[in-house]
Amino acid sequence: MKNINFVSLLCFASVLCISTSNAAELAYVTNEKDDNISVIDLSQNKVIKTIPVGERPRGIIFNKQHTLAYICASESDRIQILDLNTEQIVGELPSGEDPETIALHPNGKIIYTSNEDDALLTVIDIETATVIAQIDVGVEPEGLAVSPDGKIVVVTSETTNMVHWIHTENNTNFANTLVGARPRSAKFTDDGKFLWVSSEIGGAVVVLDVNTQEIVKEFTFAIRGIHRDRVQPVGIELSSDGRYAFVALGPANHVAVIDRKTMEVDKYLLVGRRVWQLAFNDDQSQLLTTNGISGDVSVIDVKQMKVTKSIKVGRYPWGVVIRSVP
């Protein structure tokens, strides 16, 4: 009887090991100059396949089920729909000219995209593949974010140097906030109370109170040996535990780590050249960065706060998203 139980335990442990080994996380990286997506298996830290897409892919997001990816094919003037199981383009959404960034409403039915050349925010119904509205915003709209409750969408305008606040219910612009030069990315906190915005040429990140649309905190950055003109904040990621903010600093080739408890810059992590965007894996133990000039992705161990791997991808990687697969 004891032998049978021991064998059973061994079999059960084997099943658990097989199940764990079969679990994986895949990162999808858009390569602007190669018109494709690099797929990275994070358990191996290497590219396992390349998927051709439209011209100059940049912004990329998943649907709520993580079965589809929506890709801004900027020079194709389309948002392409990629089936993640078949790895085939299965449809397109109208986007207006030169879609660059993209955001999904929490209801999973509406997509927002910024049209840099036309100074517009385009609102798209996914099911009918139709444009619901186009909203006039500032010159060269870029960063997009939707509040967790889905009531507000914001877009940053690079040349107007503003954050535009828009009611999603009626697609009207109800407020504008002046920020630093060339605002790029926007990120709501999980509780929806604050909005973080990076200003590339201004060299700063600001935190805005969502209720008042006013700036309540500004961060600037100083890295030893790097001229301040090269410190150009772009992508932002906020940890879900409320502890850290990570900011990609562009040609400074570093990621700034901000302690959100003390609201001070804690450290800088050296990554690849011209760091653009950031993405957490599922449990936020790893943070990936896309490095445009060096054509690679840096893997940051969040617990150790150190870069553990550089993974070569295509030319000018821009966007990155990560999903778990069985």
Image (tube, rainbow, N blue to C red):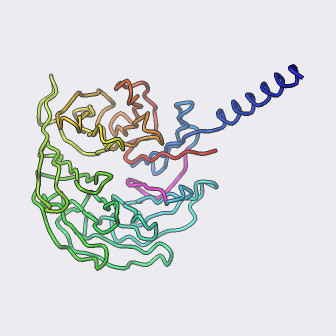
Residue 224 appears left or right of 122: left
Residue 194 image position (x, y, % from top left): 22, 54
Q: Residue furthest front?
A: 1
Point 48% across, 42% down: residue: 282
Q: Is residue 51 magenta?
A: yes
Point 17% across, 49% down: residue: 207
Magenta stretch: give its range: 50-63
Residue situated in front as seen by the camera: 94 or 64: 64
Q: Quadrant of the N terminus?
A: top right
2 lies above or below 111: above
Quadrant assignment, res 261? top left
Q: Residue furthest top?
A: 3
296 lies above or below 139: above
Residue 31 image position (x, y, % from top left): 42, 46
Residue 149 appears left or right of 199: right
Point 43% across, 75% down: residue: 125
203 lies above or below 72: above
Residue 44 image position (x, y, % from top left): 56, 30
Residue 230 appears left or right of 120: left
Q: Is residue 111 magenta?
A: no
Residue 208 image position (x, y, % from top left): 16, 54
Q: Quadrant of the C terminus?
A: top right
